[in-house]
Image: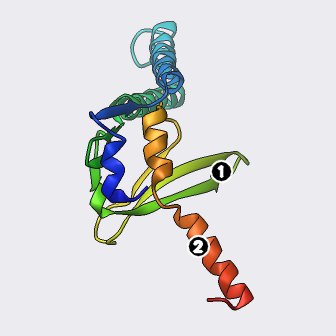
Amino acid sequence: MTPANLSAVVAAPHVYRMSIWIRLFSAAFLVFTILGFFGLLWSQNPGLAGRNVGELAEWAAMAVFALGWAVYVYGAVIVLTENAIEKRTPVRSDSLGFSQIRGRRTKVYRSLDGSYTRYLRVIPRDSLFPEIRFQQFYAFDAAFKEWFYGLPDLDAELKENERDREFGTA
């Protein structure tokens, strides 16, 4: 499917949010850290005397992190319109029109703990435009998958070009 006829797949704008499980986990983590912080405050002596400042700082830092993560998780969306894709987060928004899209790539990163995270990437024709990059944590439907996997696979083209060079046919 070429970028010119991709709009046939998307008739109305689709908004994709993070998976419900990730949103619920971020909310539960936020509640847990806030309760832990206030539980620590209420369980100790009144006033500042006798309080463990290190524990208070740890719980406060975890609560701030959990709040930031929840804001991101609940605020991040991928929007697929009839002529563009947008990634909106609380701090940044990027978009590419279908005519600006060169293709797609998939990148897998290995974390320090040995787990893997897969990123889907929409690559622009011009390097001045932003690359739209997102994890598979979003609740994508069949329309999005049809659109995304209908883009030219730049990873496959790269492998094919490398194979051609290896055998001297390019």
Residue beneath disc 1: 111
Q: Let me know if residue 140 appears in the view.
A: no
Query: In the figure, residue 67 lies in which quadrant?
Result: top left
Q: Position of residue 22 (x, y in %)?
A: 51, 27
Label 2's element? helix
Crowd tier of the residue under label 1, counting other residues whose Cα lies within 10 Å: few below 14, some 14–19, many 20 or above: few
Whether 24 is drawn above or below 104: the answer is above
Whether 80 is drawn above or below 56: the answer is below
Residue nearer the viewer, 106 or 63:
106
Q: Position of residue 125 (x, y in %)?
A: 35, 69
Image depth: mark 2 or mark 1 in front: 2
Q: Position of residue 35 (x, y in %)?
A: 48, 13
Amino acid type at circle 1 is Ser
Q: Earlier in the sequence, mark 2 or mark 1?
A: 1
Is residue 143 rendered to the left or right of residue 126?
right
Amino acid type at circle 2 is Leu
Label 1's element? loop
Do the numbered discs 2 and 1 sit on residues whose CB atoms are within 8 Å?
no
Residue displayed at 37% across by 41% down: 9
Residue displayed at 49% across by 41% down: 145
Per the model, the C-alpha gap separating discs 2 and 1 is 25 Å
Is residue 149 rendered to the left or right of residue 95?
right
Residue displayed at 26% across by 43% down: 82
Crowd tier of the residue under label 2, counting other residues whose Cα lies within 10 Å: few below 14, some 14–19, many 20 or above: few
Q: Label for residue 158?
A: 2
Given the current orientation, which residue lies at the most extreme bottom position?
A: 168
Residue displayed at 53% across by 61% down: 153
Is residue 148 rendered to the left or right of residue 9?
right
Is residue 39 rendered to the left or right of residue 123?
right
Q: Quadrant of the C terminus?
A: bottom right
